[in-house]
Every structure is written in C-alpha cells, then in structure tokens.
Image (cartoon, rainbow, N blue to C red):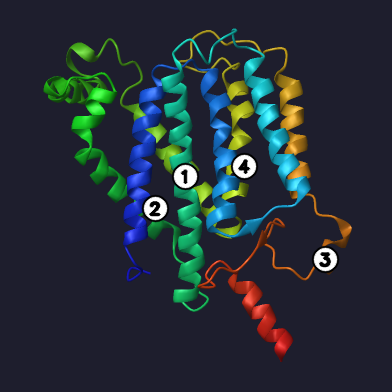
Amino acid sequence: MLSLPKSPLIAIGLLEALAAASGMAAGAILSGAAIPVLSQSFLVWQLVLSYIFLGRRYRFNQLFGCFLVAVGVIITVASGSGTGSLMEAGIFWSILMIISFLLQAADTVLKETIFLDAAQRLKGGTVDLFVINSYGSAYQAAFICILLPFLSNLWGIPFGQLLNYLKDGAACFLNVGAMSNRCNGAPLLPVLFVIVNMGFNISLLHLLKISSAVVSCLASTLSVPISVYFFTLPLPYLGVATSLPPGFVAGTIVLVVGLLIYIWRPSNSSSNPSPTDDFGAERIRGNNGCTCPVFFKKMRKKAAY
C-alpha cells in the first residue's frame, strides 16, 4: 500500500488545501443560512464528475432522489433565514463557496478512483483508510503552509501581521494571556472538535470506499437537519437554544424521502446484466478498464468457468 503512486495523493492534498482556504474565506463573509444552501452544489458536482471521470450512469430515480435531497435541505435552511441572505455579502463570495465545493467533490471522486485502482494494483486487496487519510492530510498541511502568503490576504489578514495572528491563535488555543477572556472552552473544545472531525472524515472515507462518492455525499447531507436540531438543545457554550423554524420538519421529510428514492431499486433490476455499484449506479469501463468494479470482473470469470 505504501508503494502506491503518490501523485494522486499529492493532488488530494492540493484540492483539500484549496477547498479549505476558499471555504473559510467565503464562510467568514456569508450568512449561516446561505452556506448549507450553497453546499448542495456539492451533490451536483459529484454527479457531474462521477459521470465524466468514473463513467458512472445514474437511473432516473437516483437523479430525482438527489434533487429531492437538495430541495429538502434548502427548505429546512431557508425556512429560518431572512430574505436576500445569499446576495447580501456579494456574488463573489457565493461563487467562491461554490468553487470550494467543486474542489471537495473533485477530491472525493479522486479518492474513489484511488480505491478502484488500488484494488487492481493489490490484486483484489484494498488500501487502508489511514494510508489515504494520512498522506492526504500531510500534503494538505504542506500546501496550506506554501499558500499562506496568498491565503492571508484572502482571509483579510496582511501578510506582515500573520505572525502576530498566529501567536494570538496559539494563545487562544491554550487559553492563556490576554486572550483567555475571549476563548471560553479552550483548549478542550478545539481538541474535541479535532477528535470528532477526524472520526467524521474517517467514517465518510470508509463509506466512500465501500460505496461511491455520491452515496457518501448523500450521507453527509443528512447531517444538515440533524445539526440544526442540535442547535435547539440547551448545550454548553451555545448560548440560548433556538426554536425549530416552521419548515424544518417539512424539509427533513423531503430530504429523507429523497434518500429513500435514491437507494430504491426497481424489482426488475436484478435481471439487468449491466455492472452496477452497491447502490445501483451503473459504471462503464474506460479505455484502461480501471473504472470497472473488481467484483464484477470476478463474477465474469466465474461465469466463464
């Protein structure tokens, strides 16, 4: 596994670094209600990139299910947002956020390609999740450091003040000095965030490994109404709990229906001889044959015998 080509892993680190940088820059300007709405472009990018680079074809119920998922999240979020929230900060930041989700979609599709190619290189074996995650995170950190002069200006921090900014960040993390009264919960909350975030990313990576990039995207989309619900609970450090917006339940129902429609398979699908993944999205083999699932090749060999 460690001998696999490193160029795709370097590309993953670059995509993750650019996605994180652009997403943080736009997220600091956009309203909280606008970000989940714009995040649904991630699902559209997933479908397009999977179609182009993985040769995957989707049935009508899968496309319609993805559409309902996007509509459900938009209903859930927009029900509690003010009018014009997407345009208040300017169109540039909205486009930058959409580009950030394009980079994230390309990152997940590339990871799925690595899993497919590794299965062939390892002769039916699989690459360990922590190999992909560790290399990707290391290259991401390296690219973030390289891009700091550009990113500091994008974040509204003059490069000459970046060192002081990092010092204040370290003091806030350790909850010492003059920053102690402005960083309640540190360092426990940041450490807990890192732990939970690692578990979340590893879980999505495992789901990506056993299914597809679009399925992992749908699973993460389901977390949007769940996270909104948690903000209604009297949890520490969140202040006064908010009430559910009027359209929350309706949007959640539409979202769940979309997920069920996506994973629904017609009764006659078992007689379809075309290769499909675990959730029914058809894969066609490219010129190098690397997008055809390994298990389908094994089934063809058994049929030959």
Q: Which of 58 and 185 is in front in this view?
A: 58
Name which residue type carries label 1. Answer: Asn
Q: How crowded is the residue under tag 3: few (<14 C-alpha within 10 Å), some, or many (20+)?
A: few
Residue at the disc numbered 2: 133
- Tell me which numbered mark, 4 or 2, is placed earlier along the sequence: 2
Q: Is residue 43 left or right of residue 269?
A: left
Name which residue type carries label 3. Answer: Ser
Residue at the disc numbered 3: 270
Quarter of the image for the N terminus: give it.
Answer: bottom left
Residue for point 32% across, 60% down: 7
Label 4 vs label 3: CA separation? 25 Å
Percent x, y of residue 283: 64, 63
Q: Give the foreground label among 3 and 1.
A: 3
Residue 24: in sight, yes or no? yes
Residues at marks 1 and 2 touching, judged by CB atoms closer than 8 Å: yes
Residue for point 31% across, 54% down: 10
Q: Which mark is residue 130?
A: none
Residue for point 51% across, 66% down: 116
Residue at the disc numbered 4: 219
| Element type at mark 2 | helix
Percent x, y of residue 252: 72, 27
